[in-house]
Image (spheres, rainbow, N blue to C red):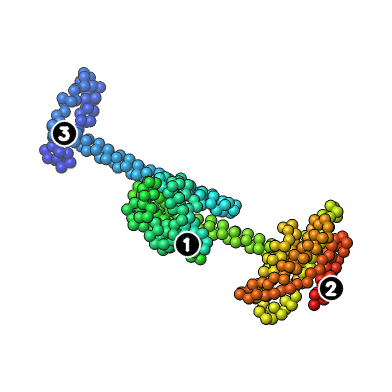
């Protein structure tokens, strides 16, 4: 029986339902079986086997559900991270666009207050809930003044309109004094804010983070501050943002001041091209141009003009006795005194080392020029006080008239020079 049954291959009592169903089909084909048996009753199934099957099914279903849940959680986590990265990238692009906008304004030479205001507005748009302020340090002053604080209360700005650069003067004054970032999470209870606590409470401000704005040479140019209405400390991202904005503000302020220095230099050079660097009077080039214009106007209107040439007496002796520095100061004092004797429409020029010439235009009569000549002689006879010394500097004057004595500058100056030397000889 063992050889026939072979229980080592097929367990005793094992029934193959498929085999029995196949036998039933053959019996039906042979006409030996009229209907198929009720297989549910034909095959015996132990109750434990049924439970085992259901438990197996349940376990398989649970495993599948667990795998689906894990996969769903993983996909959700990945999507969440991707959304976070995308949002960060969009925010970074947004901040980059804001910085590019400011750099474009700097390149187009917009006014500095407008650039700094745009910087603060950009940060407030980028970080909702914050209030930004840039306080500028005027050159040669040891204070900070608010120049761009679009969201801060006007009363509070009035209180901090001049913040001394010392440790303890709020976050900004301390940051400028120490040249380091100052983070105060609760300014209403911090000793640095004791002097302005009432204004801070009224403005509903709680936190202030201040970053000094420093140029490439190490000078403090300004401070950039972020305020919050709740007690708060900055994240690493916010600290990086504060540093970026401070660098951007430094570029704007530094460029603005360089442009201002360049404009002043250009103006100074233009001024020197037409004025005497010592006395500030018109030089020969400017004086010649004024004479040409005055002659054209006199021809058109039929009026007169006069050139008054003034030569200082013994100016070399004054230089030798008191020194060239005192001599230069004397020339400046003479220039100031000459200005008081003529009209604003007239022109005074330092024509040489110790020579001055005055253009009087729009004269109706020669007597007007002679009156000015007498006034000049009277003024020049009074002593000058230079460095505690009284110095007398007389002068000789020659006057030439247009059109009687000449029709151009050279001829008029020549006649005035001759008359001046004649008067000099007579006075001696």
Q: Which residue is denoted by mark 1 in the rendering?
A: 142
Q: Nearer the viewer, mark 3 or mark 1?
A: 1
User: x, y percentage for residue 186?
Assistant: 34, 52
Mark 3 and mark 2 lie on one chain; the one further toward the N terminus is 3
Compared to residue 353, the image places residue 140 above or below, namely above
Mark 2 and mark 1 lie on one chain; the one further toward the N terminus is 1
- Left or right, 232 with respect to 405, comes to left
For label 1, the crowd category at 10 Å Cα-Cα, with few meaning under 14, some 14 to 19 and many 20 or more, is: some
Viewer-side residue, 321 vs 90? 321
Dot 2 falls on a residue whose secondary structure is: helix
Residue depicted at x 25% and y 22%? 29
Q: Which residue is denoted by mark 2 in the rendering?
A: 422
Dot 1 falls on a residue whose secondary structure is: loop
Compared to residue 151, the image places residue 190 above or below, namely below
Q: Which residue is denoted by mark 3 in the rendering?
A: 51
Q: Considering the image in quadrants, where does the N terminus appear?
A: top left
């Amino acid at each position: 029986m063992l050889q026939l049954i072979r229980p080592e291959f097929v367990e005793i009592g094992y029934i193959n339902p498929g085999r029995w169903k196949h036998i039933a089909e053959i019996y039906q084909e042979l006409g030996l079986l009229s209907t198929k048996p009720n297989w549910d009753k034909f095959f015996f199934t132990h109750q434990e086997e049924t439970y085992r099957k259901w438990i197996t099914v349940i376990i398989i279903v649970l495993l599948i559900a667990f795998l689906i849940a894990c996969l769903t959680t993983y996909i959700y986590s990945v999507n969440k991270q991707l959304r976070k990265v995308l949002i960060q990238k969009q925010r970074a692009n947004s901040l980059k666009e804001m910085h590019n906008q400011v750099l474009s304004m700097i390149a187009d030479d917009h006014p500095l207050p407008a650039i700094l205001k745009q910087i603060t507005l950009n940060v407030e748009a980028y970080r909702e809930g914050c209030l930004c302020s840039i306080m500028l340090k005027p050159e040669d002053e040891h204070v900070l003044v608010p120049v761009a604080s679009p969201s801060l209360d006007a009363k509070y700005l009035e209180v901090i309109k001049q913040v001394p650069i010392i440790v303890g003067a709020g976050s900004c004054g301390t940051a400028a004094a120490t040249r380091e970032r100052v983070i105060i999470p609760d300014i209403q209870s911090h000793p640095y804010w004791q002097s302005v606590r009432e204004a801070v409470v009224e403005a509903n401000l709680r936190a202030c983070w201040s970053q000094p704005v420093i140029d490439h040479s190490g000078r403090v140019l300004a401070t950039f501050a972020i305020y919050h209405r709740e007690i708060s400390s900055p994240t690493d991202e916010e600290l990086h943002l504060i540093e970026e904005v401070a660098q951007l503000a430094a570029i704007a302020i530094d460029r603005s001041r360089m442009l201002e220095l360049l404009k002043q230099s250009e103006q100074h050079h233009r001024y020197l091209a037409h004025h005497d660097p010592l006395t500030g009077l018109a030089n020969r080039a400017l004086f010649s141009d004024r004479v040409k214009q005055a002659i054209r106007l006199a021809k058109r209107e039929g009026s007169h003009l006069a050139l008054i040439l003034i030569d200082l007496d013994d100016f070399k002796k004054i230089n030798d006795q008191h020194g060239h520095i005192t001599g230069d100061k004397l020339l400046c004092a003479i220039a100031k005194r000459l200005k008081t004797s003529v009209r604003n429409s007239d022109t005074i020029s330092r024509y040489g080392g110790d020579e001055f010439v005055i253009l009087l235009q729009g004269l109706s009569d020669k007597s007007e020029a002679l009156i000015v000549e007498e006034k000049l002689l009277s003024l020049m006879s009074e002593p000058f006080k230079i460095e505690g010394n009284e110095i007398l500097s007389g002068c000789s004057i020659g006057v030439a008239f247009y059109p009687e004595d000449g029709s151009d500058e050279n001829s008029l100056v020549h006649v005035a020079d001759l008359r001046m030397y004649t008067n000099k000889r007579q006075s001696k």
